[in-house]
Amino acid sequence: MNKAIIKSILCSALFAMCSSMMAQVATVSSPDGRLKVDLDLRNGQPVYSVSYDEKKMLEESPLGFKSNIGDFSTGLSVREPDPSKVQTTHVEKKYAMTRIKKSQIEYEANVYNFCLKAGEGRRQRQMDIVFYVSNNDIAFRYEIPRHGDTGSIRIMNEETGFRFPMQTTTFMCPQSDAMVGWKRTKPSYEEGYSYDRPLAESKARHGFTFPCLFKVGEDGWVLVSETGNDSRYCGCRLSDLKEGNMYTVDFPMPEENNGNGTIEPAFALPGATPWRTITVGKTLAPIVETTAPWNTLTPKYGAEQNPETGDDEILLRTYPKKEFKFGKSTWSWIVWQDASMNWNDQCAYIDLASQLGYQYILIDAGWDEQLGYKKMEDLIRYAHIKNVDVFLWFSSSGYWNDIVQSPINKMDNSISRKEVMRWMKKNGVKGIKVDFWGGDKQETFRQYEEVFSDAYDNDLMVICRGCTLPRGWEMLYPNYVGSEAVLASENLVFSQGACDKEAKDTSTHPFIRNAVGCMEWGGSFLNRQLGRGNKRGPKRTTTDCHELAQAVLFQNPIQNFAVTPENMLPESEGGAPQVSIDFMKQVPTTWDDTKYVAGYPGQFAVLARQNSGKWYIAGNNASDECDKVLDLSRFVKKGDVVTLYSDKADSEPQRTELKIKDPKKVKVHMLHNGGFVIVK
Ligand code: CA
C-alpha cells in the first residue's frame, strides 16, 4: 500500500466471534464503535446489516454472486481462514492526493475477512468477502483465489443488496435507456435527480446510477457507490426496487455500446471485484467529506506499489514519475458554441485566459476540420506565447454512437490514438477532453484505461465528458483530471428550463455526485444571457455570487469556467462586475481540505474548502431569500476580519469586510438563487 502503515493486530475484542449454534457469524465495528456491520449466513447465503449509533441503516441484505465457475450466493458455509491470511486486522494508513477534496488523508479501519466455501474436497470453491469498516465508511469486495486449473472467472450477476428501512427516502439519478438521446450516446449519467422520494421504482425501469443518496428518516444519511472499477470489470449501478425496500448491484444493459461487448465482467484468478462503498452519518458531513472512493485503492503507477517483490519494483520504475499541473481554463464552446471554432475566436479565448491568469484553454469539437492540424500548430504556438497551455477535444467513438463532431475515430483504437497523441506531445499540448463514451461495459472500461495509459506516455492529462462516473480514478491514474457524469452546464446554454433550475443543481451535487469524484461541470457564468454578445440565449436566473460560490462548491482540479471575452468589457458596456472578475482570477481549483457546514440537497449548500491555509466558505440558495446563521468556529475566530462576497438587493455582487463577532453565529444573507463566499 502506498505510504501505508499497516498494523496487523488480532483484535479479538472488536470482533464478536460466535459459535455456529448462534445466529451471527461476526460483528465488525468501526474504530469509534458507532458504525457496525453484522455478518451472518441465511440458508447458505451470506448476509449483512448495518447500524449507526444503534439505529438500523441497512436491514439484512444479501451478499454473493453467481459465476461461470460456481454459485457463490447460496449453499455456502464458513471456512477456516487461510493460515497465510489474518482474518481480523486494524489498518492505519496516511496518503496524499493532489486532485480531490483533501490533500492529506488519514484512514483507519477495522478489517474482517468473511471466509466462505462451497462444496468439499476437490470440488470445493472458496471466496472471501473482505470488509473495511472505518468511522463513517464501509467498503467491501469479493476476493476469489485460483482454483486448481481454473485461472479465470466470469461474474454472471451480483446478489449484493442494500435493503433500507421502510421510512427511507431517496435522492437518486435514474439510469437512462441505452442508445437514445443526442446521436444515440446515452447512457452518460445525465438524467435529473429526484428528491426525498419514497422507495420506488425508476421511470425507465433500469435502476439508478451511482452514487445514490438515502435519508433514513431522522436516523441519518447513507451514500452508496462503488470504486476501483478498471479495465478488469464493468461499471455497475443499483437495480430497480425489489421486495419493496431493496436494491441490488446491476450490470450494464446489453444495448449499451451499440450492443457490442458482454455485460458480464471477467478477470483472472486470484482476483477481486470492485469495492462496494457505503458512507453513513447522522448528518451530511461524512458524505461531503468522505474519502471512501480512494481509501482502499493503490495507485497503478509507481515503485511504491508493491514493496514485497523486488522484481516488480524494477519493472514498475519503467514508468517515469510525472507531475501534472492543475488550474483554470477558458473554453469558447460553452457560450460561443460551434461557430467559434475559428482562428480569431480561439485567439480571443487564449487572450482571455492570459488576461485572467488562467493556465489553460480548452479547444473544443471541430478543431481538426475547421482549423486543421497545420493551423492548430500555429494556434498552439500562439497560446504558448501568451503563457497558456492547450487541451484538445476528441470524440471517443468509434462504433458506439452516431457522433459527427470531430475528431472521431482517433481514440477508439491504439494505432490512431498513439499517432495523434505523439503529434500532441510534439506540439506541447497538455491534455485531451474525450467525449461521448460507449457506456459501462467492461469493453468501455478497457478503452478508458487505454486512453489514460497512452495519454500518460505522451504527457497528456485526460478530462472525460459524456461518460461514466469516475470510480477512484484520481488514485489509479496520475493524469486523470475529472469527468462530467452529471447534467452539466451545457444544458443551461441549451434551455431556459435548465437555467431556471440551476440553483437546485448547484445545491445538489456537493452532497451526491461530487462527493465521490472530480466533477467536470464547466460553469460559473458571468454572462446574464448565455449566448455570444450577452444579448441573446437563455437568461441566467442566478446571481453573480451564486456563480462565484459554484467555483468553490464544485470540485474539479482543472475548472473550465464559462467566462467570456465580453465579461472583460467595461461594466458600462455590458462587462461583468469587477468584483466578480477579481474573484474568478483568484479562486483556486485544488484543495487541502473540505468541510460540510450546512445544507440540504436541492435547497441550499454551504461548504468550506481550504487552499494554502486560506478558507473559502461558499454557500448558495435555491430556496426563498433568507438569512442563514452559520457556525464557522472551525474556520474563523472572534475579531477576525474576513472578505465577504454577497448579493446586494438588486442581485449585483458586493465585496465587503466583515468583522467576526461570534464565530458560532455568523449571519449571511442570500437571495433566491443567490449565494455568498467568505474568504479567510
Ligand atoms: Ca454532456
Image (cartoon, rainbow, N blue to C red):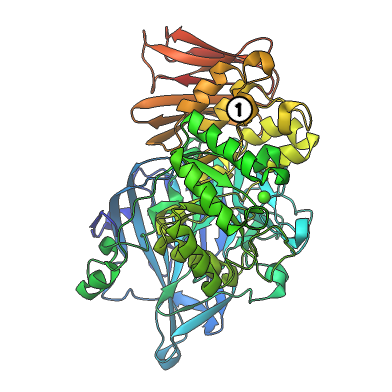
Residue found 43% across the figure and 86% down from its top = 151
Judge from the rendering whether residue 411 lies leftward or rightward of residue 118; answer left or right: right
Number of numbered markers: 1
Near-viewer residue (267 or 108): 267
Is residue 249 visible in the rendered structure shown here?
yes
Q: Quadrant of residue 143?
A: bottom left
> Circle 1 sits on which residue?
547
Near-viewer residue (566 or 50): 566
| Above or below for 641 versus 129 | above
Q: Quadrant of the C terminus?
A: top left
Percent position of residue 508, x then y: 62, 37
Percent position of residue 286, x then y: 47, 39
Q: Amino acid at mark 1?
A: Glu
| Above or below for 357 versus 249 | above
Q: Quadrant of residue 159?
A: bottom right
Judge from the rendering whether residue 305 lies leftward or rightward of residue 265; answer left or right: left
Percent position of residue 571, x then y: 64, 15
| Above or below for 298 versus 337 | below
Residue found 49% across the figure and 71% down from its top = 232
Residue found 69% across the figure and 38% down from its top = 336
Label 1 CB less than 8 angstroms from ligand 1: no
Judge from the rendering whether residue 99 lies leftward or rightward of residue 415; answer left or right: left
Is residue 192 visible in the rendered structure shown here?
no
